[in-house]
């Protein structure tokens, strides 16, 4: 999915002042996320291991007893072992029906073990070494202003990716909003082929880029980065290029003195930056260009 050309960050006026003054953005550890349900809902396979167990067993028997040529290398290690055992049974004149009965006793089926594996892996990864920067594609949303923009007394900063500078926002990935645990694939395929790069990506996105539908208004995009030397701090302040700041939008309730300070910083350090204001027009908030 293509990343929007501009992504936005709602902030209080004081935070905006710090960002412009320091030229740094605060990337938080996922430990700091404001939704307590995040990183708690693990992805699932459908059909599950229990549901797919018989299908998997029948597939293995079909491969050995009906296929003329078999490429063992494309299968997972455990599938390769079972296929080898089935091949030996066939050479000893065991029927397909008898082989299926023997095979079904040796296939694990615990869905809980996979969930536990995902959860343990997530907890280990969330040791303070991950940093996440959250943005939105929505450039004027009343709930975002209320929750993150100090109830219209703050600002909204627009950031863009710059190819020649290899800036990080091109790596942003969209958050998916779902009422249920994300499905990352079929247990039958997992049995047959094991992990692959595509499933690993789906697993990562399901854990770190999925929230409940209650948060859908955020239209969020996230950039996740692993720092090499984690500390006790649960955040890092990373510098950004002045050119990355595409625009600043002032909320209609911003303190006039804070607005003046921010405008001075823009003039001195970010003169290319477009300036917008939110105006209330007939009960509707409208984002209007003031300069740029």
Image (cartoon, rainbow, N blue to C red):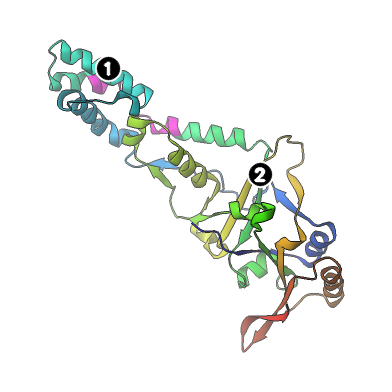
Q: Earlier in the sequence, mark 1 or mark 2?
A: 2
Q: Which residue is mark 1?
A: 84
The secondary element bearing badge 2 is classed as helix
Residue 244 point in image, percent of width and height: 71, 61
Quadrant of the rendered structure where residue 144 is? bottom right
Please state if 235 lies on the left or on the right of 208 as rendered. right
Instruction: Tell me if I can see residue 164 in this picture.
Output: yes
Instruction: Report the residue at 64% width, 87% height from top.
Output: 281
The residue lying furthest to the front in this view is: 164
Q: Residues within 10 Å of mark 1 (few under 14, many from 20)?
A: some
Give the residues drawn in magenta, as a range.
103-114
Residue 282 point in image, percent of width and height: 62, 89
Q: Main secondary structure of the magenta part?
A: helix
Residue 63 point in image, percent of width and height: 21, 27
Q: CA distance from mark 1 to mark 2?
A: 46 Å
Q: Which residue is mark 2?
A: 31
């Amino acid at each position: 999915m293509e990343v929007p050309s501009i992504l936005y960050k709602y902030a209080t006026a004081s935070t905006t002042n710090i960002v412009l003054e320091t030229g740094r953005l605060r990337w938080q550890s996922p430990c700091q996320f404001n939704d307590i349900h995040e990183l708690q809902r693990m992805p699932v396979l459908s059909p599950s291991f229990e549901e797919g167990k018989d299908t998997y067993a029948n597939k293995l028997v079909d491969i050995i007893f009906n296929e003329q040529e078999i490429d063992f290398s494309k299968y997972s290690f455990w599938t390769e072992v079972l296929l080898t055992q089935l091949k030996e049974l066939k050479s000893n004149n065991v029927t397909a029906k008898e082989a299926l009965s023997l095979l079904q006793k040796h296939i694990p089926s615990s869905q809980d073990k996979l969930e536990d594996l995902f959860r343990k892996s997530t907890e280990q990864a969330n040791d303070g070494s991950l940093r996440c920067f959250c943005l939105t594609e929505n450039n004027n949303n009343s709930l975002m202003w209320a929750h993150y923009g100090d109830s219209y007394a703050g600002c909204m900063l627009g950031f863009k990716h710059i190819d020649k500078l290899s800036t990080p926002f091109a790596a942003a990935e969209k958050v998916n909003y779902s009422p249920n645990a994300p499905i990352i694939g079929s247990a039958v395929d997992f049995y047959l082929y094991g992990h692959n790069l595509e499933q690993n990506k789906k697993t990562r996105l399901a854990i770190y880029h999925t929230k409940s539908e209650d948060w859908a208004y955020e239209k969020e995009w996230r950039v996740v980065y692993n720092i090499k030397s984690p500390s006790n701090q649960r955040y890092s302040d990373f510098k950004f290029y002045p050119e990355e700041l595409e625009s600043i939008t002032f909320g209609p309730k911003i303190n006039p003195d804070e607005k003046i300070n921010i405008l001075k910083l823009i003039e001195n350090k970010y003169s290319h930056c477009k300036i917008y204001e939110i105006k209330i027009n007939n009960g509707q908030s409208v984002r209007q260009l003031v300069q740029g």
